[in-house]
Amino acid sequence: MTSKNLVQVTDQNFETTVAGAARPVLVDFWATWCAPCKALKPVIEELALEYADQIVIGELDVVRGGKPAQRIVGYQPKANLRQKIDAVL
């Protein structure tokens, strides 16, 4: 399942999608070989639906391709990600 609310971030649209966004942005930096990334994808898609009107949630394939407000490494339960999102809203 790919959510229509999950934005595909690339080198070409990073400035407008992330740096120039009017809303907070969560970017999932992932890679096809990364098992935790694959495990996290369904959670990211659910959050993209739940927060569609409040934040921009995107994914960027690090193999293909701003200063982060926060860096989260590894798999995180949905509740932890919700807490971090809610903290910046």
Image (cartoon, helix red, strand yellow):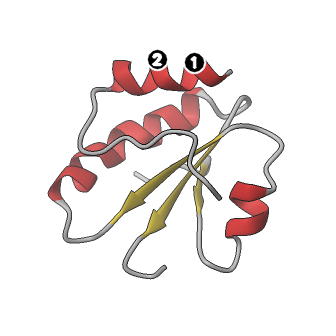
What residue do we see at 57% from left, 18% from top?
Answer: 86
Q: Nearer the viewer, residue 31 or 88?
A: 88
| Type of amino acid under label 2 | Gln
Return the x and y of residue 45 as percentages of the image width and height.
45, 42
The circle on residue 19 is none
Of residues 45 and 85, the one drawn nearer to the viewer in this rendering: 85
Residue 73, picture quadrant: top left
Q: Quadrant of residue 89?
A: top right
- Residue under numbered circle 2: 83
**Residue drawn at (67%, 68%) of the image:** 14
Q: Where 12 sits versus 52, above or below? A: below
Residue found at x 49% / y 39%: 70
Instruction: Give the left or right position of residue 85, taking residue 64 as reference.
Output: right
Residue marked by disc 1: 86
**Viewer-proximal residue, 5 or 16?**
16
* Rendered location of residue 57, percent (x, y): 58, 45
- Residue 38 lies left or right of residue 83; in this view the side is left
Amino acid under disc 1: Asp
33 shown above or below 69 = below
Between the C-alphas of marks 2 and 1, the distance is 5 Å
State the residue at coordinates (35%, 26%): 78
Residue 32 location (% of width, % of height): 26, 71
The x and y percentages for residue 12 are 68, 80
The local secondary structure at tag 1 comes to helix
Q: Are marks 2 and 1 in contact (CB under 8 Å)?
A: yes
Mark 1 residue crowding within 10 angstroms, few (<14) / some (14–19) / many (20+): few
